[in-house]
Image (tube, rainbow, N blue to C red):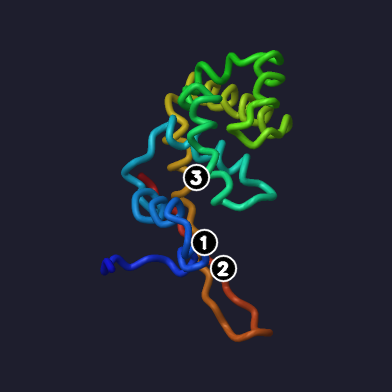
Amino acid sequence: MDDLKRCSWVDNYPDSNIMTTYHDAEWGQPNQYSDKKLFELLTLEVFQAGLSWETSLKRRSGMNTAFLSFDIDLVSKMTNEDIERLKNNPNIISNKLKITSTIHNARVIRQIRQQRGSFLTICGRSLMVRLSITILPVGMKFPVKMNYRNR
């Protein structure tokens, strides 16, 4: 047994090595991010909608292949023929809207990169605005304070 402290949600998956590995290697590890990695995580989130994160992670390898190693430029050039082919791919979550959304997201990220240089930079800027919420007993109003940081 290891002494690594884990978030309580990991306990919901006692038989899932994939969730424990994800938690230990990726969860809350900001130094790993790049435009490509953010696109991969966005894609996994899109495909997870209505399902569990575990389901999305189990299909990650198939999605990596289907979406060309999450290469934003290559995915942005995918066509209707690619969408039809991917709908029949048993290694991914075969949902046309999710496939189409992923290609659209790649196109938008590509545009952001052309205009602003980096998707990661844009995401990082949006994270500079923090909500600080004080938890108070039920029925009491809570103050919300916006913290803006200039970098």
Mark found first going from the N terminus, 1 or 3: 3
In the rendered view of the protein, which quadrant contains the N terminus? Answer: bottom left
Amino acid type, mark 2: Val
Amino acid type, mark 1: Leu
Secondary structure of the residue carrying numbered label 3: helix
Q: In this orientation, which residue lies closer to the viewer: 105 or 96?
A: 96
Task: Give the image quarter of residue 32.
Answer: top left
Question: Neighbour class for label 1 at 10 Å: few (<14), some, many (≥20)?
Answer: few
Secondary structure of the residue carrying numbered label 1: strand
| Distance CA(mark 1)–CA(mark 3) | 12 Å
| Distance CA(mark 2)–CA(mark 1) | 7 Å
Residue 128 coordinates in the image, percent (x, y): 44, 50
Mark found first going from the N terminus, 2 or 1: 1
Residue 89 coordinates in the image, percent (x, y): 64, 27
Seen at 47% across and 57% down, the residue is: 16
- The residue tagged 1 is 131
- The residue tagged 2 is 144
- The residue tagged 3 is 126
In the rendered view of the protein, which quadrant contains the C terminus? Answer: top left
Residues at marks 2 and 1 touching, judged by CB atoms closer than 8 Å: yes
